[in-house]
Image (spheres, grey):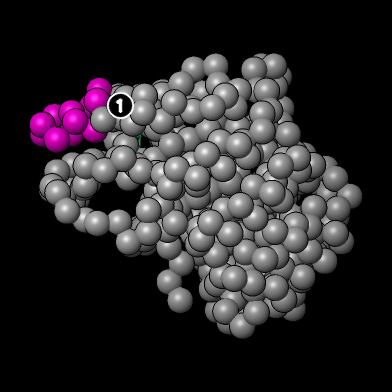
Amino acid sequence: MENLETENKHIFQSCDWLEHGIIFDHCNLVRVCCSQCNEGGGRPILIHNYHGEPMDWDNVFKMKKEMRDVQRTGETYAKCKGCILLHDGEWDDENYINRLLLTHWIDCNCRCVYCPAIRDEELKKINKHYDILPVLQDMCNKNLLDKHAFISIAGGESTIYPEFEDMLHLLLDYGCDNLLINSSGIKYSKAIEKGLAEHKIQLVISIDAGTRETYEKIKLVPTYDKVTENLRNYAIAQGDKKFYLCSKFIIVPDYNDNEKEIELWLENSEALGIQEVAIDVDWRWIQKNLNNLQNERRIYELIVFAKKIADREKLNLRYDERASIMRKIHHVKTAVFGGTMRKIKE
Ligand code: SF4
Ligand code: SF4
């Protein structure tokens, strides 16, 4: 799927997920996307009750074609109505995957206070882990996966999937070069190390703290030293091009919402050899204060403070989705980071 021919392109409204995306989600469903904040409801389903069975790709692409063809008529597929990810573009008619999200597992070795998945008893009953490796092997063998596909591996915690190392080696050896992994950072992965060294993976570890005490209050596990050591080793692995490892800080009000914690986090990041940092805000706080965000100066000022210290430490600060929303509400022109990774530009 390398150097895919771009014949037969047309210009109309669609989105990358609708055209060439697939998601293995934690409710044992195979979907087109995970976006659900639109009038149509989003998240079109391709397969129900999926547990790792061999994929009938002809049928998957047939179902996707029916959805995609609606866009080609100038109408909007019902589930996609009102979705902000729809945009005018040049789209081809080929069948292949260039957006892949693996989030079929919710177990984690961390217990973040803000994590809904690990506390959702109903979800735990529904979620059944299955081995995704044969599915990926099949996808690669049949050349269905674009080598430059955006691949996001999430969870739960992906490094504790039994098949994680093999899965990542398979994708790297196949030639995939645009992977995003969000990890707790507790378990060190040699496969991630290889991907960082080859500059094919972006790894994001949300440490959320500048001190062990605060880390343990938020994460509820005694693993601060382990995560710090792993961050240092991952930073070494990426070599001189330091765009691939990102340390993140989610502002969790009443836990880490103070200047001292943010300053220590940034100073520690710099000392660990990290160049990329990201800031965000606890989604629960945003939801609770949704109608009053314009008056919530305190959290916004912490975001401004983070930028000031990041500049002082010569770190690149990225505003993730909810931090971008806070900046936008407080009249700062900013792009809202939508959670879909762009190819890292060197
Ligand atoms: S347009 Fe929105 S709802 Fe439709 S597939 Fe794309 S992301 Fe999903
Ligand atoms: S690391 Fe991620 S999956 Fe694990 S508890 Fe924290 S937020 Fe949840």
Q: Which residues are magenta?
A: 66-78
Q: Quadrant of residue 248?
A: bottom right
User: Looking at the magenta stretch, what is its main secondary structure?
Assistant: helix
Relative image position of residue 201 (x, y in whole percent): 57, 61
Task: Please report the residue visible at 36 percent of the width from the left and 28 percent of the height from the top.
Answer: 58
For mark 1, give the secondary structure.
helix
For label 1, the residue is 62
Task: Please report the residue visible at 55 percent of the width from the left and 65 percent of the height from the top.
Answer: 200
Q: Nearer the viewer, residue 109 or 139?
A: 139
Q: Residue furthest left?
A: 73
Q: Quadrant of residue 3?
A: bottom left
Relative image position of residue 136 (x, y in whole percent): 55, 41
Relative image position of residue 249 (x, y in whole percent): 64, 57
Q: Amino acid at mark 1?
A: Lys
Q: Is residue 70 magenta?
A: yes
Q: Is residue 241 above or below residue 115?
A: below
Q: Quadrant of residue 130?
A: top right
- Is residue 16 visible from the viewing direction of this image? yes
Q: Nearer the viewer, residue 100 or 252?
A: 100
